[in-house]
Amino acid sequence: MIALPETFNVAAHLVDRNVLEGRGGKIAIECGDEQVSYRQLLERTNRVGNALRDLGVRQEERVLILLPDCPEFLYSFFGTIKIGAVAVPANNFLKTPEYEYLLNDSRARVAIIDEAVLPELESLPRERLRFLRQIVVLGGSRQHLSFRELIEAASPELIPELTSKDDVAFWLYSSGSTGASKGCIHLHHDMVVCSELYAKGILQMNESDRCYSVARLFFAYGLGNAGYFPLHCGATTILSRARPTPAGVYADIERYRPTLFFSVPTNYAALLAHCREGGREFDLSSVRHAISAGEALPAPLFQRFKERFGIEILDSLGSTEVLQMFIANRPGEARPGSSGKIIPGYEAKIVDESGNPVPGGEIGDLHVKGDSICAGYWNQHEKTKQTFEGHWFRTGDKYYQDEDGYFWYAGRADDLFKVNGRWLSPAEVESALIGHPAVLEAAVVARNDENGLAKPAAYVVAKQGSVANEELARDLQEWVARQNGSYKRPRWIEFLPELPKTATGKLQRFKLRELQNQRT
């Protein structure tokens, strides 16, 4: 357990401390042509905190943050926490019904939003937003408070609220890969635990590092990568307001020269599929570690990336509930296709349906214990009881552990299905499909045949230049059968232009099941 004083404000730890330790003139944030020093970060964070107090935000009240990855996101996030209120960052690419749900579920008193979000909120009748009192807009708006005007008028001096290390600091809504989002309640100490155990303990992050994350700040993974990890270590974070594209990500890496690159399997696949006109290779020489999370990284992507750039991708496992990683591959010890080993400071166990540990090599339900696990789900009592058992969090993932201590993903608990009496892991079939030179992405779900028996159905995104036809489908079926056995051979293969995913890049299998149900 990480020792912290009982009275502890994590915003003061991550922001004020860097100035007190002499890093006031060091660059904390780079975004486009803008550079923000740690002293400027402190002053602007203080201004946001004071502005929120002036708007009537009190301790423990929620502030919804709907901003792109930009310095103002971090000012708003830490300014909210510093006054003892609760920051609730959320996806800024949603639609009106989702925003209505988030505003009413969180009971946010103030929403700090980007001007691009405003039309979605303005279409909501205010009487349907029971708790919202003020909207603060970054950008142009005459009808609402201006973010810039508000903080310019506020004081740059702010004494942190005397919060406890176990007080609520922020919520993160789950990405909805299996349905409706749930608000995970996180405490002031959680970000420090994750930073010490993973950023420092595994990645050896230090103040000379430069962090670049494809995963956005509203996502638990991105919030650590580009938010509190670098600030905890006195490093520099590189932010981009633009939605990530392969060309844009490569351009940012070559321009800003990050040392730590955080991404997701979908983006790694897209990067590998992208080549520069003229044939000159992209320069990733600044990157000392590339990290992946969000979903399991197939071994073929690991191999292709290493062959092309000489960089091993360190696949890891985390969740919104745990906040960041709890299982990870170590530098120099990566095992392609695995999620890695348990991170010291966390505990994991793989159990059967009765809760008993399974023998090594057998698939079971993964449970994890650690001090960064959320206090529960907001306003979802039954779901909290189902998911958290004492100190243990039931991840909902199926895993097995090999004799060397590496954990191997076998699918979500509701993803596995039996074929000919044997369990089939969609992840295993997907990895085989992605290993085919014509395949960019693949997803496998169960579909009943004419006898009502479950068989694997594969949804495939072909690489550019590949012809998605019946001949390729037959080739893919035989490819899987040769590698994984005939019972794992997809009975059906359907080509799609893209797979359904959350905004954070996680595959939404339930949407593929819905697609199947609509057709049958």
Image (cartoon, helix red, strand yellow):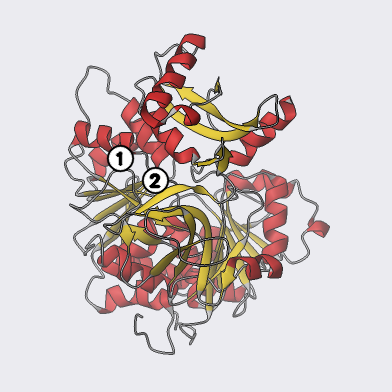
* Residue 458: percent from left, percent from top: 53, 28
Crowd band around label 1 with a 10 angstrom C-alpha radius: few (<14), some (14–19), many (20+): some
Is 239 located above or below residue 164 in the figure? above
Judging depth in this view, the residue of 336 and 166 nearest the camera is 336
The reply to whether the C-beta atoms of the residues labelled 2 and 1 are less than 8 Å apart is yes
Q: Residue at x 50, y 72 (%)?
A: 392
Judging depth in this view, the residue of 49 and 77 nearest the camera is 77
Q: Quadrant of residue 491?
A: top right
Q: Which mark is residue 240?
A: 2
Q: Is residue 11 visible?
A: yes
Q: Residue at x 29, y 39 (%)?
A: 302
Q: Residue at x 55, y 44 (%)?
A: 416
Q: Amino acid at mark 2?
A: Ser
Crowd band around label 2 with a 10 angstrom C-alpha radius: few (<14), some (14–19), many (20+): many
Side (left or right) of 190 relative to 19: right
Q: Which mark is residue 252?
A: 1
Task: Give the alpha-carbon distance from disc 2 to disc 1, as whole Å.
Answer: 8 Å
* Residue 382: percent from left, percent from top: 70, 68
Q: Quadrant of residue 435?
A: top left
Is 172 located above or below residue 185 in the figure? above
Q: Residue at x 36, y 59 (%)?
A: 327
Label whose residue precedes the other's in the sequence (2 or 1): 2
Circle 2 SS class: loop
Circle 1 SS class: helix
Question: Among all residues in the image, which is located at the extreme front?
Answer: 421
Q: Is residue 222 visible?
A: no
* Residue 222: percent from left, percent from top: 42, 54
Q: Amino acid at mark 1?
A: Asp
Q: Which mark is residue 455?
A: none
